[in-house]
Image (spheres, rainbow, N blue to C red):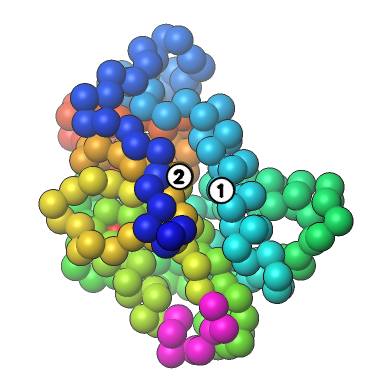
C-alpha cells in the first residue's frame, strides 16, 4: 500500500557527513554539526518519488500545490523530474501549479496555531487531482489543517508528498502518501528548511547545533 509506504529511513544514531567533505556557505559553518542528507541524495530520491507519483496519479491532470516557504525547493526539483518523465515517455500528464503559505513555527517549536497567510483561493481546486508538496511533517498538524481546509472545496483526489517525516512522540500519527526520508527527532535546516528564515540558502540538509539556536533566536 503506497499510502503507508515508508520513506528511506535515516536512523537516530546516523553520524552523517563531516561538513568539510562538502561545500557549505562560510556564514553557516559554525552553526551546523553535520550534513545529514547531502543534496545529491535528495535529488536521487526525488527522481524516484516523481516516478511513483506519475504512476499513481498520471491518468489525469495534476495540480501541484506548493506549501510555502519550506516546500519551494523540493517543489521545483520534483516538478522538474515530473516534467522530464512527461517529455520522455509516450504517456504524459498535464501539470499546473498553485501555492499556499502556511506558518506554524517559532524558533524550533511547532505552535498549535497553523496560519494560512496567502496563496490563491482554494476553491479553484474543486474537482481537481491535487498533489500537496511539503518539506517536512513533524506533528502532522499543519498537514491535517490543510487537508481539512481543502476537503471543503471538494477536490477529486488529494495526495500528499513530503520530503521528510520526523520520527517523534509528538506525531499525531498522520502519514503522507509519499515520503522521501524518515528522519530523527532533531531540528533540520537546509534545502529550504529554515530556522527563523535562515538556512534556506544551504543545499544540504543539516542538523542545527545548540549555539545556532541561540544565535538566530527571535
Ligand atoms: P507540523 O505541523 O508539526 O507537522 O510541522 C510542520 C511544519 O513545521 C513544516 O511545514 C515545517 O515548516 C516546520 N518544521 C517542522 N520541523 C522542522 C525542522 O526540523 N526544520 C525546519 N522546519 C520544521
Ligand atoms: Mg512547511
| Main SS category, magenta section | loop
Residue 120 appears in the rendering:
no
Q: Quadrant of residue 139?
A: bottom left
Other residues around mark 2 within 10 Å, as few (<14) / some (14–19) / many (≥20)? many
Q: Where is 80 relative to 41, above or below?
A: below
For residue 40, above or below residue 114: above
Please give left or right for residue 193 compared with residue 39 in the image.
Answer: left
Rendered image: mark on residue 68: none
* Circles 2, 1 touching at the beta carbon (< 8 Å): yes
Circle 1 sits in a helix, a strand or a loop, which is it?
helix
Question: Residue 174 versus residue 117: which sits nearer the camera?
Answer: 174
Residue lying farthest to the front in this orientation:
1
Residue that label 2 marks: 180
Residue depicted at x 36% and y 67%: 143
Q: Pinpoint residue 167: horizontal percent, then vertical percent.
A: 23, 46
**Residue 68 falls inside the magenta stretch:** no
- Is disc 2 placed on a helix, strand or loop? strand
Depth order, front residue of 195/183 = 183
Image quarter of residue 27: top left
| Residue 49: assigned label | 1
Q: Which residues are the magenta region?
A: 150-157
User: In the rendered view, would you say 196 is above or below 53?
Assistant: above
Q: Residue 6, image x and y in percent?
A: 38, 48
The answer for how far apart the CA atoms under marks 2 and 1 are is 7 Å
Q: Is residue 48 visible from the viewing direction of this image?
A: yes
At 48% from the left and 15% from the top, the residue drawn is: 22
The percent position of residue 78, horizontal first and vertical second, equals: 61, 49
Amino acid at each position: 500500500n503506497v499510502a503507508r509506504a515508508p520513506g528511506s529511513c535515516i536512523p537516530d544514531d546516523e553520524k552523517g557527513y563531516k561538513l568539510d567533505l562538502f561545500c557549505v556557505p562560510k556564514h553557516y559553518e559554525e552553526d551546523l554539526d553535520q550534513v545529514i542528507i547531502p543534496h545529491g541524495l535528495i535529488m536521487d530520491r526525488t527522481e524516484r518519488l516523481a516516478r511513483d507519483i506519475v504512476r499513481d496519479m498520471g491518468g489525469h491532470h495534476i495540480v501541484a500545490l506548493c506549501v510555502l516557504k519550506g516546500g519551494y525547493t523540493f517543489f521545483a526539483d520534483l516538478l522538474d523530474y515530473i516534467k522530464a518523465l512527461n517529455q520522455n515517455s509516450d504517456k504524459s500528464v498535464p501539470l499546473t501549479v498553485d501555492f499556499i503559505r502556511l506558518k506554524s513555527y517559532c524558533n524550533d517549536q511547532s505552535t498549535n496555531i497553523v496560519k494560512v497567510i496567502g496563496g490563491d483561493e482554494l476553491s479553484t481546486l474543486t474537482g481537481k487531482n491535487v498533489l500537496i508538496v511539503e518539506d517536512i511533517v513533524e506533528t502532522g498538524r499543519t498537514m491535517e489543517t490543510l487537508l481539512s481546509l481543502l476537503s471543503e472545496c471538494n477536490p477529486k483526489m488529494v495526495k500528499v508528498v513530503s520530503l521528510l517525516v520526523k520520527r517523534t512522540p509528538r506525531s499525531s500519527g498522520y502519514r503522507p502518501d509519499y515520503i522521501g526520508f524518515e528522519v530523527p527527532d532533531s531540528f533540520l535546516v537546509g534545502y529550504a528548511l529554515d530556522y527563523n528564515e535562515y538556512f534556506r540558502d544551504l543545499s544540504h540538509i543539516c542538523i542545527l547545533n545548540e549555539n545556532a539556536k541561540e544565535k538566530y533566536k527571535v
